[in-house]
């Protein structure tokens, strides 16, 4: 059924000319990049912090080349050689071998700098050598440049991978924007509908008489937090958009600034402060993501305006013995729940 639906979508895209991103959520993603000045390396680092991807670096076979010397004379000559004879393998500079198991990947993100309005020569070599193997795969493109537009780089990518499924839009980060790479990458991932970095693991979040299911991130922080379950705590109100609780133990961290907080995000601030957000807003703070409530409808109303008991539990469990309605407390309302359960059995 899923494959049939995907086929229908692709047919509609072809017939109507509509651009739709269909990342493969059940396949691995490879990020392949080349970086000379370090800007692309920083962008890829931001990407790694927000996704579960494999990363490979393209490197020239000859080490120590200074492409910036003599007004970028070497880089310019390499680009000219490719431009003059794009179908000749001898036109492309040698790179160190990269053994890619292409059967493992359905998604590929290519991250590259721009040279003289074209894709950097070493990355062109990689795509020239692997373009056939990338046929049918979803391809996202990230380009770093000083100021020049990236249309030439996009054209190079589509020439070298003629049968790739290129997803729009491309991410263009100017050199002056590299310091904001984390936010720009986050926004791009959302815009291209990149699959969330989930481990497939879930937990239950109980607030009063409301039960929410949260998908956990595929990281050490989420795994360590899950080891603490079941956990029922009183979370404090802050800023009209979050509830927080300081744990007695610390958790592993890999904090980044997400740029935008989304209602339903479950984050770690510092190494022991668990935060549940019930509003969407922009932030300048850094967090390590634990998970996200799949459907945050009613979350704000359930959490209320003050401090509140919240239960973090394995799916299907109650916060504590006698807590029959999942509100994290044992009180008279559980008696009513028990009576209803008994009446339902009669």
Image (cartoon, rainbow, N blue to C red):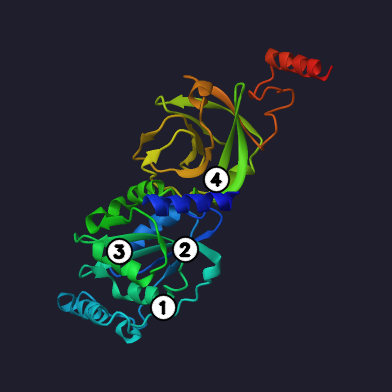
| Residue 280 falls left or right of residue 78 | right
Structural crowding at the residue carrying mark 3, measured as other residues with C-alpha within 10 Å and reported as few (<14), some (14–19) or many (≥20): some
In the rendered structure, which disc, 1 or 4, sits on the residue that comes first in sequence? 1
Nearer to us: label 1 or label 2: 2
Could you tell me which secondary element the residue under label 1 belongs to?
helix
Closer to us: 216 or 346: 346
Q: CA distance from mark 1 to mark 2?
A: 15 Å
| Whether label 1 touches label 3, CB < 8 Å | no
Q: CA distance from mark 1 to mark 4?
A: 43 Å
What residue is disc 1 on? 129
Q: CA distance from mark 2 to mark 4?
A: 37 Å
Would you say residue 241 is visible in this rendering? yes
- What label does residue 251 carry, if any? 4
| Residue at (36% x, 60% y) in the render | 141
Would you say residue 307 is visible in this rendering? no
Question: Residue 118 falls in which quadrant of the image?
Answer: bottom left
Residue 42 in percent (x, y) is at: 34, 59
Structural crowding at the residue carrying mark 1, measured as other residues with C-alpha within 10 Å and reported as few (<14), some (14–19) or many (≥20): some
Nearer to us: label 1 or label 4: 1
- What label does residue 154 carry, if any? 3
In the rendered structure, which disc, 1 or 2, sits on the residue that comes first in sequence? 1
Check the picture and name the quadrant holding the C terminus. Answer: top right
| Whether label 3 touches label 4, CB < 8 Å | no
What residue is disc 2 on? 137
């Amino acid at each position: 059924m899923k494959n049939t639906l995907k086929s229908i979508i692709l047919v509609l895209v072809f017939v109507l000319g509509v651009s739709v991103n269909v990342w493969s959520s059940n396949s691995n993603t490879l990020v392949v990049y080349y970086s000379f000045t370090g800007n692309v390396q920083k962008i890829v680092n931001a990407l790694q912090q927000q996704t579960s991807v494999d990363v490979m670096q393209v490197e020239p076979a000859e080490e120590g080349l200074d492409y910036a010397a003599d007004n970028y004379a070497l880089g310019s000559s390499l680009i000219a050689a490719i431009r003059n004879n794009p179908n000749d393998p001898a036109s492309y500079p040698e790179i160190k071998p990269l053994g890619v198991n292409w059967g493992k990947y359905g998604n590929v993100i290519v991250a590259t700098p721009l040279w003289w309005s074209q894709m950097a020569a070493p990355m062109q070599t990689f795509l020239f050598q692997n373009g056939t193997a990338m046929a049918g795969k979803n391809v996202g493109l990230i380009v770093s440049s000083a100021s020049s537009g990236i249309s030439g780089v996009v054209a190079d990518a589509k020439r070298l991978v003629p049968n790739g499924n290129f997803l729009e839009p491309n991410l263009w980060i100017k050199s002056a924007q590299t310091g904001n790479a984390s936010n720009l990458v986050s926004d791009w991932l959302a815009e291209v509908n990149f699959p969330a970095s989930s481990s497939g693991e879930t937990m239950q979040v109980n607030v009063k008489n409301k039960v929410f299911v949260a998908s956990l991130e595929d990281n050490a922080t989420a795994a360590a937090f899950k080891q603490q379950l079941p956990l029922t705590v009183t979370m404090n109100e802050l800023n009209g958009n979050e509830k927080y609780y300081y744990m007695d133990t610390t958790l592993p961290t890999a904090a980044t600034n997400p740029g935008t907080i989304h209602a339903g995000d479950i984050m770690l601030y510092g190494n022991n402060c668990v935060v549940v957000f019930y509003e969407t807003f922009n932030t300048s703070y850094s967090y390590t993501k634990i998970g996200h409530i799949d459907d945050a409808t009613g979350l704000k109303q359930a959490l209320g305006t003050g401090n509140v008991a919240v239960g973090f539990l394995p799916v299907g469990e109650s916060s504590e013995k006698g807590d029959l309605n999942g509100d994290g407390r044992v009180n008279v309302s559980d008696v009513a729940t028990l009576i209803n359960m008994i009446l339902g059995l009669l």
